[in-house]
Image (cartoon, coloured by chain):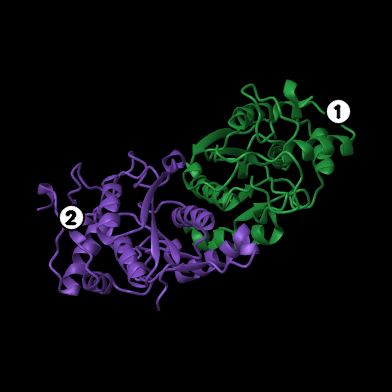
Chain colours: A purple, B green
Amino acid sequence: MNSRDKDAVVLLSGGLDSATVLAIALRQGFRCHALSVHYGQRHVAELEAARRVAAALGAHEHRTMAVDLAGIGGSALTDPTLAVPESPTTDIPITYVPARNTLLLSLALGWAEVIGAEDIFVGVNFLDYSGYPDCRPEFIAAFESLARLATKAGVEGCRYRINAPLIKMTKGEIIKTGAALGVDYGMTVSCYQPDARGAACGKCDSCRLRAAGFGAAGVADPTTYAASAR
Amino acid sequence: MNSRDKDAVVLLSGGLDSATVLAIALRQGFRCHALSVHYGQRHVAELEAARRVAAALGAHEHRTMAVDLAGIGGSALTDPTLAVPESPTTDIPITYVPARNTLLLSLALGWAEVIGAEDIFVGVNFLDYSGYPDCRPEFIAAFESLARLATKAGVEGCRYRINAPLIKMTKGEIIKTGAALGVDYGMTVSCYQPDARGAACGKCDSCRLRAAGFGAAGVADPTTYAASAR
């Protein structure tokens, strides 16, 4: 597929998954408009990482938007009174942010409509998704249908596509793909509770998935861990 | 219908329609959590109006969230370099905010999930909708389906309802309904470009629809118009 000169909005958190998605969209020839959303999450270090990743990979532009999702509470990622869990769980974890991907895709859709992009890229992942409902293929399909109904561009014939190229990959496959595309994962931050310099805790769900992924991919783990992680 | 002690999130802009929706939800017995969203719109006077309306009608609580939708541009309501039109148009107008209702409903859904509410109320209106695609019944139905897929609560069996009680009413019917429920429309602000004290321009789409609505309803128009509107 070659989509040269076509515009895409790419949701870029600064984590490992979305950095890989940006590399995939660029390789497909899209002119990528990277969007990071600050929704009151604790891990602001991710947003700095997003800026570095967008520049290093060659996004056309990068914008950061703010939403005060912390105001509605309900997640250990946005509510400082809730502790981030440091052991595995089989339930949907407390780090789940209510309606997060619906919100992120809404913002991406609004920007896509303004710049005339038909494609939106998002790094959701079904296999390693930690039980988040808004990472499932049926959610992505439903949002794609909604996008065509929700917008002026959709009414006028725009066929929005929600591209989720990682949705059925394992973390190891994601890392292999990104490494082959030249992603420097040392720039990315996955930890739910990094320290002020972006160093990872090594204990949260996200750190555990990430470390296991490098192992499975046979790629050296470039993550900077906090001293307390050792 | 009596929903006493059931919680609902009610999107409350401070305009005429959403004030009427809040009155309807309260009459149906819901404990109403009113949500206003500041998305960079020019008409901040609406948000003050929302606060007054929530208190006067008896909402259980009222929160205001901020989203910097102005950052993606594309609407005369959020971009100060675009003029608000003062004559009717048959096209989707420049005051259309990309993906606005998708975004507002996403925020309402997130809050609903946190507080355990199954019902969301929104004042969209199909007949007088000025051509906005995200005010159509098929959009509301699609979002309701999405809500059940997008959330932890939905996965666990919550049947979200997106209530749009005004969707097939004329502006006159809306005003008659609200007046019968005791809504003081003098508190509401509909104008797209009110002055600093909330006085209406009398010229924009929204002012024209509102004024015609009071005429059709046979209800005295309590709107405060700016001196320049006369």
Question: Are discs 1 and 2 less than 8 Å apart at CB?
Answer: no
Question: Label 1's element?
Answer: loop
What is the chain identity of the residue bearing mark 1?
Answer: B
Q: Is residue B62 above or below residue A176?
A: above
Q: Is residue B186 above or below residue A84?
A: above
Tell me the residue at 53%/54% (across/down). A114
**Which residue was labeled with disc 2?**
A202
Counting other residues with Cα less than 10 Å from the Cα at mark 1, is it few (<14), some (14-19), or many (20 or more)? few
Residue B156 seen in the current view: no
Q: Which numbered marker is on residue B220?
A: 1
Residue flagged by tag 1: what amino acid is it? Ala
Q: Position of residue A164 (x, y in %)?
A: 41, 69
Q: Position of residue B13 (x, y in %)?
A: 63, 37
| Marks 1 and 2 belong to one chain | no
Q: Is residue B227 above or below residue B2?
A: above
Counting other residues with Cα less than 10 Å from the Cα at mark 2, is it few (<14), some (14-19), or many (20 or more)? many
Residue furthest to the bottom in view is A1
Mark pair 1, 2: CA separation: 66 Å
Tell me the residue at 36%/41% (across/down). A79
